[in-house]
Amino acid sequence: MGYFLIPCFAASFVIGSLTPTGALGQVPNWPTQPIKLIVPSTTGSGLDIVTRLIASRMAPEMGTSIVVDNRPGANGIMGAQAAARATDGHTFLMTSPATMAINQHVYKNMPYDALKDFVPVTQTTSIAFLLVVDANSPYKTLNDLIAAAKAKPGEVKFGSGGIGNQSHLTPELLAGATGTKMLHVPYKGDVMAITDLMGGQLDFVFGTVPGLLPHVKSGKLRALVVAQQKRSEAAPDVPTTAEAGWPSIVSTGWTGIVAPASTPPAVFNKMHDAAVKVLAMPDIRQTLIASGAEPVGSTPEQFGAFIKTEGVKWGMAAKNAGITPQ
């Protein structure tokens, strides 16, 4: 899940603690041990880095240390499975679209149910997805690209970091909304797709603002739109899909905290309050926004509704792509 890199942040496996403050100390007898926050990706990935940034400030609020436990594998399934099975009352999962909304439409016999086995705590960040073309591309706007796809069905090519991930399914959202057919070229990672886009072998790529914006600023790529309703604070000059006349094309990377379904409400509410407090801290907000990740801090109810909506959306995109769970 290599969404972005946050500069000037020294990560450690155990985040230290101080004394809890304010209303956050009102849940009696919890925590009684260090809190474990499972990250279903490798150390140094975007998901891992944002987790450590937030956890470093949450630990003092919680009155205990927070252990960041990396469990990569199977597109996040291994980490999510471990969190779903936890019964110690101190384990949480930092999640993403893959673990909560996409995998269920790509893989058979999932070892966890995203909606039944977890309770939402809060969405922590939202990460805009950007549509880019080569700097020498004839396409100057999203509608130029759509017109070409309508005129040449199946000939406009897009690359992705692999079948069934968000960089693949976002163009499928575009194709479904515009009634077009485009050719998918999967790669073993986003970097290879971006390289071929710059080499003129692809027509466009969808990816995160943090991953693609440096290439736009260098002049190697041209950004056509961000796939959301409002402009990205990290790329304020790039119009949105809504501005281009396609408001239904919405794709954001995101991070959020969920807890095993057996977690008592008082516990995940305390975790929620600490996370929201940290996300409102000016220096944390500034660091996240500078990296392309906009802080959110939603209520559990809002995050739960969002996860359900995301599951429906990505299910439709997978169906449009002809993906059969394997």
Image: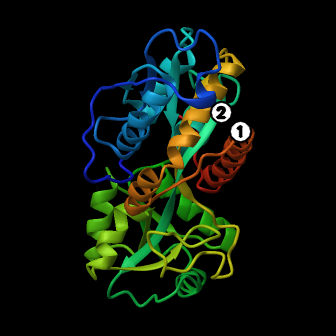
- Whether 312 is drawn above or below 240: the answer is above
* Cβ atoms under marks 2 and 1 closer than 8 Å: yes
- Whether 95 is drawn above or below 5: the answer is above
Q: How is the image coloured?
A: rainbow
Secondary element at image label 2: strand
- The crowding category of the residue bearing disc 1, from other C-alpha atoms within 10 Å (few below 14, some 14 to 19, many at least 20), is many
Query: Residue 244 versus residue 263: which sits nearer the camera?
Result: 263
- Whether 282 is drawn above or below 74: the answer is below
From mark 2 to mark 1, how far is it between C-alphas? Answer: 6 Å
Apparent side of residue 253 relative to residue 219 in the rendered image (left or right): right
Residue 105 can be seen, yes or no: no
Identify the residue at image location x=59%, y=43%: 123
Q: Residue 78, position in %: x, y?
A: 44, 24
Secondary element at image label 1: helix
Q: Amino acid at mark 2?
A: Pro
- Whether 3 is drawn above or below 212: the answer is above
Q: Amino acid at mark 1?
A: Gly
- The crowding category of the residue bearing disc 2, from other C-alpha atoms within 10 Å (few below 14, some 14 to 19, many at least 20), is many
Q: Which mark is residue 56?
A: none
Identify the residue at image location x=52%, y=82%: 145
Query: Residue 200 versus residue 241: which sits nearer the camera?
Result: 241
Query: Residue 76 versus residue 94: which sits nearer the camera?
Result: 94
Q: Residue 71, position in %: x, y?
A: 38, 26
Q: Residue 20, position in %: x, y?
A: 50, 25
The residue that disc 2 covers is: 120
The residue that disc 1 covers is: 304
